[in-house]
Image (cartoon, coloured by chain):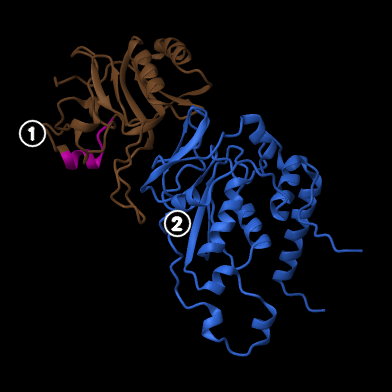
Amino acid sequence: MAYKPQYYPGNTSVAKNRRKHMSDDVEKMRDISDEDLTALLGHRAPGADYPSTHPPLSEIGEPACPVREVVAPTPGAAAGDRIRYSQFADSMYNGPATPYWRSYHAAINFRGVDPGTLSGRQVNEMRERDMEEYTKRQAETEITDWGLSGLRGCTVHGHSLRLQEDGTMFDMLDRRRLEGGVIVSDKDQVGVPIDRKVNLGKPMSEAEAAKRTTIYRVDNVSFRSDKEVVEHVQKVWELRTKYGFVPKA
Amino acid sequence: MVRAAPIPGKPIQIKVFPSRLLQPETAEKLLNEIDQVKGVIRMLVGGKNLPRKVTCGPGTGSDVNHPNREVIHVGDIAFELHVMVGEVIVEVEDESSKEELIRACERALPFPFEFKQGFFIKTKATLVDYGKYGFKSKDDESINLEDERMLGLIDPHANPESNLCIVAGEGK
């Protein structure tokens, strides 16, 4: 029988969404063109070549190494791309993702990933073209709701604040806003104006966000209501505590 | 600004804490409704900072142009919002104004809000106030301030011109 990964326990909608994020079994919600995404990231001009930090691996002539023979380099590494980052912030008011689940999604489903998981934001460093592929995946799918999430390279303040009157997460730098029922962005992730207005699609309704969230909340799906998850967390806690004493067999 | 006597009676302080961050129009409506309540001594508007320029990261120095940094009109004056309003602390003369204040908030806010009574704005001068304003004279060790209602409304080091507004006439 083929091995089937068991990503996360639990029977509630939140647990199911967590499994979906980890396994990359997520629904595509919108289309964002490559050029628009490049403009939002702000690392290079849309349409420009990828600057490189070293020659392509095929030209370098790598030393004989069994590991290098087994592991194929990612496209970005093979081309010698620079390391670049993208960073998301997600609202605690039923944002679809949380920093941990963005990291799980990146680290399980992509290669050459260096995820940084913080309390209110999640940053991911990768080779530039790999990073763009990963960011596009997160930006176009249900992992991101542009009303409750934001691509924020700096000044991420907002994830733990009350929502604005229009139901979107506060953004001090006004990178994206609700206009005519859709979220538009006219700045890159660090707040520098770009030469276009990127349409990021309709934000989720409150009910839909509550359905797709990976956050346990008392006013939605409470953590304690998922007995299997509580049991799992307690088991992990118990085992790591015991291991803290390094029991010898 | 006229010299005012210390606040008479037993004023109480109320914090109005809406469940959403307010757009400028709603904030303007709320402040005007509160301004109409009889017995309001002072208000302190708090919220999330809306900077003029990007202050950190690679975009430092770029203009933000946040659409919510608007000029609003409260009573007979206009001022620019520097924050997205998240709370309003109101000091009223006594308990009798509370009911009217709740009704004013209900009229202005289309969503729920918390209405808490407590001590939110200081009423006595502290060391930094004395450091900034000093004593009145060698014989009078009270704080050298024309209007003591300013205490607690702004940081002693801040510029009152851009942070403090006197909405009503001298009697209020």
Which three-letter amino acid code belongs to the residue tagged 2? Gly
The image shows residue A75 at horizontal and vertical percentages of 58, 69
Q: Is B38 placed above or below A50 here? A: above
Q: Is A112 placed above or below A220 here? A: below
Pinpoint the chain carrying mark 2. A
Q: Would you say the magenta stretch is mainly helix, strand or loop?
A: helix
Residue positioned most to the right? A1
Which chain is assigned blue?
A
Q: Is B82 placed above or below A67 here? A: above
Give the residues in magenta: B124-132
Pinpoint the chain carrying mark 1. B
Q: Colour of chain B?
A: brown
Which type of secondary structure does the marked residue at label 2 adopt? loop
The span from disc 2 to disc 1 (Cα, nearest Å) is 71 Å
Residue positioned most to the bottom? A64
Out of A15 and B15, give the one closest to the viewer: A15
Which type of secondary structure does the marked residue at label 1 adopt? loop
Q: Is residue A221 magenta?
A: no
The image shows residue A58 at horizontal and vertical percentages of 56, 81
Q: What residue is drawn where x is 61% and y is 74%? A: A73
Out of A174 and A29, give the one closest to the viewer: A29
| Residue under pointer 2 | A47
